Amino acid sequence: MPNTVKLTTSQALIKFLNNQYISFDGKETPFVEGIFNIFGHGNVLGLGQAMQEDAGDLKVIQGKNEQGMAQAAVAFAKENFRRKIFAVTSSIGPGSANLVTAAATAMANNLPVLFLPGDTFANRQPDPVLQQIEQFHSQKVTTNDALKPVSRYWDRIERPEQLMAALLRAFEVMTDPETAGPVTLSIAQDVEGETFDFEETFFEKRVHYVDRVLPSEDSLKRAVSVLQRAEKPLMVVGGGAKYSLAGEEIAEFSRKFGIGIVETQAGKSTVSSSHPYNLGGVGVTGTLAANKAAKQADVIIGVGTRYTDFTTSSKTAFAFEEASFININVSRMQAYKWDAVQLVGDARITVQKLNNMLGNYESSFMEELAGYKQEWTAERERLAEIDIDLDDKNYAPEVKDGFSRDQLKAYAKALNTAYAQTTALIKINELIDPSSYVVTSAGSLPGDMHRVWSPTVENTYHVEYGYSAMGYEIAGSLGVKLAHPDKEVYSMVGDGSFLMLHSELVTSLQYRQKINIILFDNAGYGCINNLQMGHGSDSFCTEFTDVNGSVINIDYAKVAEGYGLETYTARNNQELEQALEAAKKSKKSTFIQIKVLPKTMTDGYDSFWNVGISEHSANQNVMNKVPEVEEMRSRAKQY
């Protein structure tokens, strides 16, 4: 008979988590860093009691909002290249429901997080319990079923012994580069405290080995054959390249053969922006340089990218009918896209092999790439020095996307500013330490960051754009700080996203994890207002105005000051420089609110985003836009 140890289900879970390790490139490290928690009925008397008695080496961090702490866990996994995670536990009902957005964020970005929501009673004796959902067709349905579509693996634990098989499956999923993503183990609240005689061997140190997947020799030969015929090859560097730590190999490959580099949001900063052939972000939020190169390229090498609509400009970015594709990805499904030559393998090792096999090849693209980059550098310099004078009719057209000069003047007066968002961003880029980390997620800031932010230190750009979750920015910054406690972390957040979720500011203060919040206030959902009015619609429910139409000027710095942060306000470069210098010296979290004028973000640059438009409207401006949209849609690849 095997030796056993009597433990509650929760005690067994904690003991198991403490003994999980991951091995990558011969380096072995603990896989689970800790557990974020908000306790309530359903987890406080089970998991809570187990952690209180003996959490082992796990860090236990109290969250303030279930979505917020879970988004911090998502960011932590991203910053650790999927080789270290936080678990997240919540109570049943609303606590579990609040995890759904964060789970979807992890799912869209292929990031491992272990969700441990409490659940209703397995024995059903006290049903229906507080916060229990009652369905006519099944008594097994609970709030946690909402997590099924946004989990790579989902299981419900209704007996203590089920925990063992569920945990082994969960860790297999989370540590596999192809399937990495969120796992939900929903544990019934009575079962959390029930005891069982677990085999002792289940708690022995377990190492999850992650081996770099090698592409087949035949697929490499096919790819080399295509590349040797290429005149203007271009690499699209995605998140998979970053997680593979392939930056150095990609940079060398590009420089050696004259192959252009463009970046997705997830792939940006894998290679330094100073690389001569790195043209920056591509697609809807791309630079003019990258989008010009994309249209000229005759071979596209996708390195760890999913080719989302923003990367492909809704399937108009590349010359799909003429260009050939080579896709490097650990997922065959992703490698299969665009009828590509499929290199199913690890990005780093695959690029190394191509480098060794390509011989004396040299592209004819280098001169054009250098020209595109020089042209974009000049445009970025222009964006850095925008001086707005709304009384000067030579400054801007009378109407911008239907937004009149008088409306801009009203905002300038209400916010007491004429500061351009792009100018502020580039100034921040110049002033902060290049080794600092920057975080954003939703609104106009990801587009501006993708275009104008120039990270010279690899892997310092953290933009969540797989799900573009509003509210990720501040919580994500906490996760990044936990991953890099010795670095400065800056959260770029719009006023709309700040209002969505900023509760983990308190957590950063509580655990003395300094983060720097930089809030861009343009009094509204500026990104969606641009989308709305750019398609002919009138401005509607996207500006922060009162019932009389007056702009609402909120002092967000006072909100942050109330929490205990050091706060500053900037309306020009001089005030921003002073605020950033003070923030660097602070020992605790800081908050800089920047009042910026609407309509001062970047836009366009040879890109197209296919979104819905009303084909019948009483608004003639909308009807005037329909042919333009349909014409662009006609250029798109259909599958």
Image (tube, grey):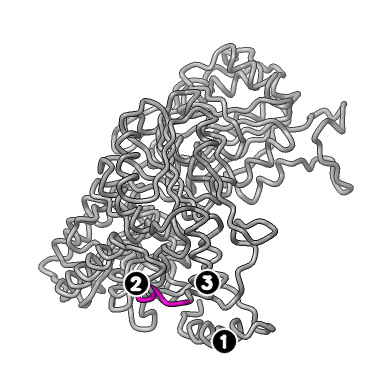
The residue beneath circle 2 is 325
Residue 218 on image: x %, y %: 29, 65
Q: Which residue is mark 3?
A: 403
Do we see residue 354 in this rendering?
yes
State which mark lies toward you, 2 or 1.
1
Q: Hey, what amino acid is under mark 3?
A: Phe
Name the residue carrying label 1. Answer: 624
Q: Which residues are magenta?
A: 393-398
Is 299 rendered above or below residue 197? below
Residue under the image location 23 percent in, 52 percent down: 272
Please give the name of the residue rendered at 33% of the width and 34% of the height, measured from the top-left corner: 582
- Residue 343 visible, this angle: no
**Residue 521 appears left or right of 151:** left
Question: Is residue 465 left or right of 261 when viewed as pictured?
Answer: right
**Amino acid type, callout 2:** Phe
Magenta part, dominant SS: loop
Instruction: Give the structural element (helix, strand or loop) at label 1.
Output: helix
Q: CA distance from mark 1 to mark 3?
A: 17 Å
- Under circle 2, the secondary element is strand
